[in-house]
Image (cartoon, rainbow, N blue to C red):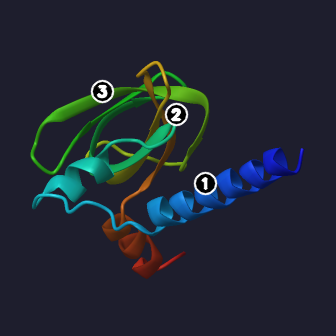
Amino acid sequence: MRTALLRIRVWAVAAGIASAFVLAAPEPAQPAGAGKANAERPSSRFAMQARSGTLKTYRAGQSVVFAGPDGRLKRLPVDPAARVDRGLVRGQQVNVISMTDETGRERVSAISRGSSDAAQNAAAPRP
């Protein structure tokens, strides 16, 4: 019986030492640019993305179309519970926050005025 307990203790100590070496091992070096590609991939079930652009059309609770900085149009469905700034106007700079779920469907969760429009509205004289 005593030899069996001794064997168990030896195996437990050996497993502990082996796990310490595994945890202390340095991470393998990544090639240049690999970190950027990994940063763009979602690490969880949901991925949030923030974009800015020029508002083309907005239909409350249905969809938004905006042109990105590269000029390409992007149409996204808007979640009915999305937070949307009041008074959005076509041609206005906007920030669009969307979420992609585990099925790959993307929905807008927030639309706000762009920073340049917010600064102009703050500087405008009020009657």
Q: Label 3, label 2: how many angstroms apart (C-alpha)?
A: 23 Å
- Residue type of the residue flagged with mark 2: Arg
Q: Where is residue 114 in the image (x, y as percent from the top left)?
A: 36, 60
On the image, the x and y values in percent for residue 94 come to 35, 52
Q: Mark 1 packing: few (<14 Cα in 10 Å), some, or many (20+)?
A: few
Which numbered dot is residue 75?
A: 3
- The three-letter code of the residue at mark 3 reads Arg
Contact between labelled residues 2 and 3, with CB atoms less than 8 Å apart: no
**Image coords of residue 13 (percent x, y):** 66, 61
Check the image and report above or below for 109 versus 2.
above
Residue for badge 2: 45
Q: Which of marks 3 and 2 is nearer the N terminus?
A: 2
Q: Which quadrant holds residue 77?
A: top left
Q: Nearer the viewer, mark 3 or mark 2?
A: 2
Which residue does the image show at 47% across and 65% down from the upper left? 21
Q: For the residues carrying marks 1 and 3, which lies nearer the camera in this image?
A: 1
Q: How far apart are marks 1 and 3 (CA)?
A: 55 Å
Q: Judge by depth and name the residue closer to the eye, 14 or 112.
A: 14
Q: Is mark 1 on a helix, strand or loop?
A: helix
Q: Where does label 1 land, which residue?
A: 15
